[in-house]
Image (cartoon, grey):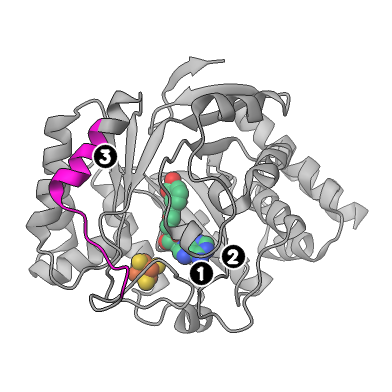
Amino acid sequence: MIKLFENIRAKIENGARISDGEALELFESNDLLAIGELAARANRKKNGERVYFNVNRHINYTNICVNRCTFCAFSKTAEDEGCYTLALNDILAKAAEAAAAGATEIHMVGGLHPDLPFDFYLEMIAAIRADSPQLHIKAFTAVEIDYFARLTGQSIEQVIAELKEAGLGSMPGGGAEIFAEEVREQICPEKISGERWLEVTEKVHRAGLRTNATMLFGHLESHKDRIDHLGRLRRLQDRTGGFQTFIPLAFQPDNTRVPGARGVGGVDALKTLAISRIYLDNFRHVKAYWVMLGLKIAQVALAFGVNDLDGTVVEEKIGHDAGADSPQALAKEQIVELIRKSGRVPVERDTLYRELRVY
Ligand code: V47
Ligand code: SF4
């Protein structure tokens, strides 16, 4: 074990990358602090003492979805009680409210609605851009892009070009879940495959848009499946350099249909964040999404290789529908305080990681 940590430390110092075998040994080690120390070292080389956050707002325009992922407590059918689709005016009002409160980003995703035409999404983006030009619109995932292409009979390239023209600025990292086919078959059988997610994302990067990448962990996947997931992301990033941030999403089990589902413990969460940082040597940023992790683990994660705490969020449904016990929103001052109390330097960023203010 000591040899494992020494070898990895040398690799980090020399800018070499760890192998899948070494990542597996890390997952199977109980030496959380040694893993964290390596991850903190890898992060410090890239980002020094700075920890990023942004002022943003999430808008989930509809929860009606033709996919019925078993891990998802957010989605409904058009017949279910509690299903909704926001009217364009409501969406614009939420965006304008966010802009007035100093937000620089709108994060928009939703279900795959059976009836809304592609024009609805183009109009939504164009209207937000016209109304609140100061907001960066980060919206949709590879899953939606593939759905829009099927809806319209257009190529992925054409769909991306039209969204970009309407004002899409970048894409969040959702829909990746776990790429390993056998697990994906159980948790999201109707969703596009992992390979398709990667293929669509590659096209988005080639069109000049940056995206993030996520990994949903803590359900049915093994350590090997997690490493397989990280490996496919690392290889795509080698080809395109289009990923900004990696975000491990801790599975929330309430109201879901994953057999035997339990929550993610603190040790597993910290280990997964840290190993992601060490393994993904070609990702600059690793985000602790406080909504799924809880504020305390997200703050401690800053000592385990993490350099981003996401944002103010304002209104969150996906995690809270599945039992997340974090707050709905954070004020900018609360995020600054969380980072300060960890001894690091809070930096407000925009979506593309331009520094807006150092605290
Ligand atoms: O793709 C769904 C996940 C994702 C559950 O890119 C769940 O900056 C946990 O991708 N428990 C959407 N997770 C959220 C997302 C995201 C969030 C914040 C920042 C960024 C970013 C991206 O949420 C889905 C899915 O993987 N999800 N259900 C659940 N029960
Ligand atoms: Fe639909 Fe996305 Fe939920 Fe799957 S995770 S059911 S695609 S909203």
Marks 3 and 2, Cα distance to the nearest angstrom? Answer: 31 Å
Tell me the mark number nearer the camera, choosing from 1 and 2: 2
Q: Quadrant of residue 81?
A: bottom left
Residue 121 visible, this orientation? yes
Q: Secondary structure at mark 2?
A: strand
Q: Secondary structure at mark 3?
A: helix
Q: Which mark is residue 94?
A: 3
Marks 1 and 3, Cα distance to the nearest angstrom? Answer: 32 Å
Magenta region: which residues? Answer: 81-96
Marks 1 and 2, Cα distance to the nearest angstrom? Answer: 8 Å
Magenta-colored stretch includes residue 309: no
Mark positioned earlier in the residue sequence (1 or 2): 1
Q: Which mark is residue 178?
A: 1
Mark positioned earlier in the residue sequence (1 or 3): 3
Amino acid type assigned to the residue bearing label 1 in the image? Ile
Amino acid type assigned to the residue bearing label 3 in the image? Lys
Asked if disc 1 and disc 2 are in contact, CB closer than 8 Å, the reply is yes
Q: Secondary structure at mark 1?
A: loop
Is 292 on the left or on the right of 275, as rendered? left
- Which residue in the protein does label 2 denote? 217
| Identity of the residue drawn at 29% across and 28% down | 99
| Identity of the residue drawn at 56% across and 36% down | 308
> How crowded is the residue under tag 1: few (<14 C-alpha within 10 Å), some, or many (20+)?
many
Q: Position of residue 234 (x, y in %)?
A: 52, 54
Tell me the mark number nearer the camera, choosing from 1 and 3: 3
Is 172 on the left or on the right of 164, as rendered? right
| Identity of the residue drawn at 50% across and 39% down | 310
Magenta-colored stretch includes residue 84: yes
Q: Position of residue 2 (x, y in %)?
A: 92, 53
Mark positioned earlier in the residue sequence (3 or 2): 3
Q: Position of residue 209 (x, y in %)?
A: 28, 43
